[in-house]
Amino acid sequence: MRRYGQVIRVRPDRVDRYVALHAAVWPGVLAMIAACNIRNYTIWLRRPENLMFAQFDYHGTDFAADMARMAADPETQRWWAECMPCHDPLDTRGPGEWWAGMEEIFHCD
């Protein structure tokens, strides 16, 4: 298992929309997340800065293949079309990143 952490901003005029979307995530999206070996997925929101932190545990053996599978899923694509206009990605994110990856520096079970 590998833990991942990511960060992104939410556009101030879209915070309520984003929170509402995540209060009722579509069942097909949740199923795809599980099928792609992601567990313990949490998104946190820090207001008033509108920063979001996401953390999840990956239990698979080929992260790139699982992420490609998720990206190819039509329902996930529709979900992202709803969510992505709410995002304000960090200018410092890495190449190919939407949510900026983070370095884990401490963990305590």
Image (cartoon, rainbow, N blue to C red):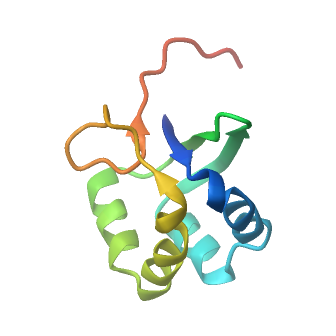
The answer to whether residue 1 shows anywhere in this view is no
Report the number of discs.
0
User: Of residues 90 and 26, which is closer to you in this image?
Assistant: 90
Q: Residue furthest front?
A: 13
Q: Position of residue 24 (x, y in %)?
A: 77, 73
Give residue 41's position: percent from left, percent from top: 64, 50
Q: Identify which residue is drawn at 29% across, 67% down.
A: 68
Q: Is residue 95 left or right of residue 9?
A: left
Report the residue at 66% width, 47% height from top: 43
Left or right, 51 with respect to 65, comes to: right
Image quarter for residue 50? top right
Q: Position of residue 12 (x, y in %)?
A: 63, 51
Q: Residue at x 63, y 71 (%)?
A: 30
**In the image as oriented, which residue stretches furthest toward the bottom?**
74
The correct choice, above or below, for 100 with respect to 41 in the image is above
Q: Is residue 20 left or right of residue 31?
A: right
**Residue 52 percent location from the top left of the image:** 61, 41
Q: Say which residue appears at 70% left-offset and 70% top-offset.
A: 21
- Screen quadrant of the C terminus: top right
Q: Image height check: is 53 above or below 106? A: below
Q: Is residue 86 visible?
A: yes
Horizontal side of residue 100 vs 19, given as left or right: left
**Nearest the eye: 12 or 80:** 12
